[in-house]
């Protein structure tokens, strides 16, 4: 398993999701990504996107306006 990171602070919707999607294409099933953003819409958008695409939200936290998550690449 490989681990990646993606910092989307300063980006507004839909750019965090666009960047997640681009990074996930380079990942293998089971790989994980540490994600950070400050766009509050990510709290709803990231889990919704993962549900539609078959990827997994391992954890998600919104603390003081900073959203951190661990995402796992689902089966291709």
Image (cartoon, rainbow, N blue to C red):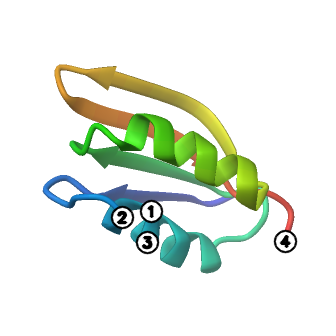
- In this rendering, the label closer to the viewer, 1 or 4: 1
Residue 65 image position (x, y, % from top left) = 19, 28
Question: Position of 3 compared to 30: left or right?
Answer: left
Residue at 73% in and 55% down: 52
Residue identifier under label 1? 17
- Assign a secondary structure to mark 3: helix
Residue identifier under label 3? 18
Q: Which mark is residue 76?
A: 4
Question: Position of 45 compared to 28: left or right?
Answer: left
Residue identifier under label 2? 14
How many C-alpha atoms fall within 10 Å of the one at disc 2: few (<14), some, or many (≥20)? few
- Assign a secondary structure to mark 1: helix
Tag 4 or tag 1, which sits nearer the N-term? 1
Q: Are marks 3 and 1 in contact (CB under 8 Å)?
A: yes
- In this rendering, the label closer to the viewer, 3 or 2: 2
Marks 1 and 2 sit apart, C-alpha to C-alpha, by 6 Å
Q: Quadrant of the N terminus?
A: bottom right
Marks 3 and 1 sit apart, C-alpha to C-alpha, by 4 Å
Q: Nearer the viewer, residue 52 or 55?
A: 52
């Amino acid at each position: 398993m490989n681990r990646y990171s993606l910092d989307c602070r300063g980006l507004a919707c839909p750019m965090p999701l666009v960047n997640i999607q681009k990074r996930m294409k380079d990942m293998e099933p089971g790989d994980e990504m540490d994600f950070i953003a400050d766009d509050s819409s990510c709290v709803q958008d990231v889990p919704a996107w993962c549900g539609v695409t078959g990827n997994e939200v391992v954890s998600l936290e919104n603390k003081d306006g900073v959203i951190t998550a661990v995402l796992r690449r689902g089966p291709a």
